[in-house]
């Protein structure tokens, strides 16, 4: 008996839907913490999920917008206090 490790499930819409949701969550988290890292990750995940044709384009668009907002917040705070980090 021979067992193979091949996958029977092709990557598809479910994976792209997960990427859309992940981009939204990471973009939202990025507004609070680690916007230098989470913003670009949210942008990439949203772009890939939109390119692959997700069933949740609204969620992916929100993730993309929040990722861009993360970077805008970062630049604004860097201009305000001349540092890369910020605290409350």
Image (spheres, grey):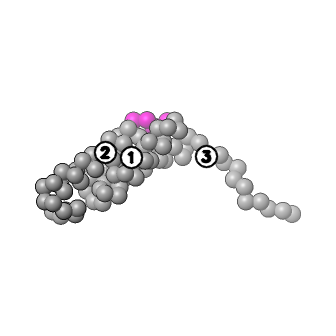
Q: Where, quadrant-wise, is the C terminus in this rendering?
A: bottom left
Query: Residue 41, how many percent across, how many down?
Result: 40, 52
Q: Which residue is drawn at 22% across and 52% down?
A: 75
Q: Dominant secondary structure of the magenta stretch?
A: loop
Q: Mark 2 points at which residue?
A: 68
Residue 21 visible, this orientation: no
Mark 2 or mark 3: whose residue is earlier in sequence: 3
User: Residue 43's mark?
Assistant: 1
Instruction: Say left or right for 50 vs 28.
Output: right
At label 2, counting other C-alpha atoms closer than 10 Å, the crowd grade (few under 14, some 14-19, many 20 or more) is some
User: Residue 11's mark?
Assistant: 3
- Which of labels 3 and 1 is toward the front? 1
- Label 3 close to label 1 by CB (< 8 Å): no
Query: Residue 60, how many percent across, how many down?
Result: 41, 40
- Label 1 close to label 2 by CB (< 8 Å): yes
Residue 68 visible, this orientation: yes
Q: What stretch is highlighted in magenta?
A: 54-58
Q: Residue at x 35, y 58 (%)?
A: 37
**Could you say whether the residue bearing mark 1 is in a helix, strand or loop?**
helix
Spatial distance from mark 3 to mark 1, Cα to Cα?
A: 20 Å
**Residue nearest the observer in this picture, 9 or 48:** 48
């Amino acid at each position: 008996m021979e067992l193979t490790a091949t996958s029977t499930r092709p990557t598809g819409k479910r994976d792209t839907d997960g990427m859309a949701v992940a981009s939204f969550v990471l973009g939202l988290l990025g507004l609070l913490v680690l916007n230098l890292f989470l913003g670009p990750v949210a942008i990439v995940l949203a772009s890939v999920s939109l390119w692959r044709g997700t069933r949740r384009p609204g969620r992916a668009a929100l993730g993309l917008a929040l990722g861009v907002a993360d970077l805008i917040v970062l630049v604004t705070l860097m201009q305000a206090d001349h540092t890369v980090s910020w605290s409350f």
